[in-house]
Image (cartoon, grey):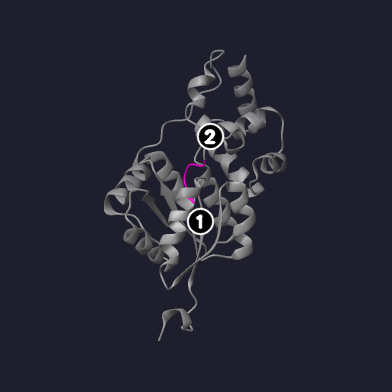
Amino acid sequence: MDQKTSSVSPLRVFILDDHEVVRRGVRDLLEAEPDIEVVGEAATGREALARVPAVRPDVAILDVRLGERPESGGGDHEGVEVCRELRARIPDLACLMLTSFDDDEALFDAIMAGAAGYVLKQINGSELVTAVRTVATGKSMLDPRTASRVMARLRAPQEPPVATGAAAPGSGASELDRLSPRERQILELIGEGLTNREIADRLFLAEKTVKNRISSLLAKLGVGRRVQAAALVGRVRG
C-alpha cells in the first residue's frame, strides 16, 4: 500500500529560517519523504510565534540566528528565544535547532531552552531527515561530542557573584559582558523603566519568558533586585 494513503498521520514539521533558499531546500528535502508533511514556514521569530500554534506541528526546525535586524536583537540567538517561547506554549513540541555556527554558548542556551536537538547546516540530507524523525519520537538528537560539551558546561563551577557595593563608577562594563545580547537588550529596557509585560510586548515574548530571563541576568550580575540592575545600566551609560 502507498504510505501516503496509510492511516498513519504524517509527521508535521514547521521551518523557521530567514534565508528563503534554505527554507526551500529543507522543505523540498522533507516533502520528498512519504511520512513527513511541512505544514508551515516563517522567516522571522515573530512570524513563527504567530503561525506555529495555529498549525500545531510535531517538530519545529529553528534557525539559531535570524539576521542582523535591530528588532531581532542584532543577530542574537533569536531562534533560541523562539524555542523557549514555543516550548512554554506547546510543551510537547520538539524543537530541532539548525545553525551554521558551532557555537558553545548557543548550544548550551538551546538545550536549556528545551531544544530536543542541535545540528549544523553542513549536515547531509538523510541525516537531517533522521534527526527530524528522532526528535519527533521524544528522543534527544545530540552526538556524543556535543553532549559532552553540554555536560562540561553544566559541571563547570559558577563564577562568584559580582560585589556591587564597592564598585567604582563605570566598572559595570565588565559585569555586562557576562550577559548575552538578548539579556543586555532586556536590561536596557529595564533601565528605561519598562515592566515585565511591557518588555514582553516590545520583544514579542511571553511575560513568563521575560521573568525567567530577568532572573538569569540578575544572577549573572550578582544583584537581587531589578532596580540595582537598572542602576548598573545608568552607571555604564554615565
Residue at position x 68%, y 41% in the image = 196
**Is 122 rendered above or below residue 224?**
below
- Percent coordinates x, y for residue 45 in the rendering: 58, 47
- Percent coordinates x, y for residue 96 in the rendering: 44, 56
Tell me the quarter of the picture where residue 139 sits: bottom left
> Quadrant location of the C terminus?
top right
- Helix, strand or loop at mark 2: loop
Mark 1, Cα crowd under 10 Å, few <14 / some 14-19 / many 20+, is many
Numbered circle sitting on residue 107: none
**Is 233 rendered above or below residue 109?**
above
Numbered circle sitting on residue 68: 2
- Residue 213 belongs to the span the image colors magenta: no
Q: CA distance from mark 2 to mark 1?
A: 19 Å
Residue at position x 66%, y 32% in the image = 189
- Which residues make up the magenta segment? 62-66
**Is 54 rendered above or below residue 215?**
below
